[in-house]
Amino acid sequence: MKVSFVAFAVVAATMAACVTDPPPPPRPPPGTITPAPPTCNYARPACAGTPMTYADVLPVLKRGCFACHAADGMAADDHDFTKPAVAIAQKSRIAVQVGACTMPPRQVPLAPADAQTLMMWATCGDEK
């Protein structure tokens, strides 16, 4: 009986660790002056050239969004970006949140090039 309880506790603790947010970055030592974070504002681009498609941004979505917006991710129930129709329907919301750097969370920021790619697709993509 004790062995099965211990095994259950280990499995439960392991599963709980998988669904929690990553830990915040370490605090600087006392007395250290931490610079203010840079402002974040990715503007909607001017549309030119061939419009991007979901397939074009899929690698960026995988890198920056699927941790939460796919499979068992915390936001997958309403915002499963593995489904093209869902991501396409939410392009405007994606642009607003990526443009203001509210998504992805600050613990896992997008590379500037990835943010610009998402902004270009969300603003100028050919899917309606």
Image (tube, rainbow, N blue to C red):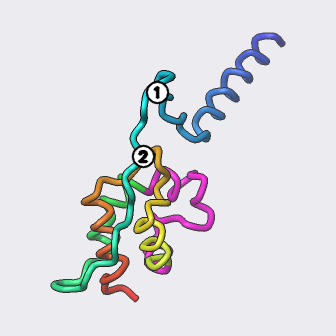
Q: Which residue is mark 2?
A: 36
Camera-nearest residue between 20 and 41: 41
Residue 64, how many percent across, how many down?
39, 54
Camera-nearest residue between 48 and 27: 27
- Among numbered discs 2 and 1, the one appearing first in the sequence: 1
Residue 55, how many percent across, how many down?
30, 70
Range of the magenta residues? 65-89
Where 97 falls versus 89 (above or below)? Answer: above
User: For the residue carrying disc 2, how many other residues have a C-alpha within 10 Å: few (<14), some (14-19), or many (20+)?
Assistant: few
State the quadrant of the N terminus. Answer: top right
On screen, residue 9 versus residue 72, left or right, reads right
Q: CA distance from mark 2 to mark 1?
A: 13 Å
Residue 4, how many percent across, how many down?
77, 17
Q: What is the total number of numbered labels drawn onto the structure image? A: 2
What mark, if any, has residue 81 been given in the picture? none
Q: Which residue is mark 1?
A: 28
On screen, residue 59 versus residue 39, left or right, reads left
Camera-nearest residue between 101 and 81: 101
| Residue 80 among magenta residues | yes
Q: Are marks 2 and 1 in contact (CB under 8 Å)?
A: no
On screen, residue 37 versus residue 114, left or right, reads right
As helix, strand or loop, the secondary structure at mark 1 comes to loop
Q: Amino acid at mark 1?
A: Pro
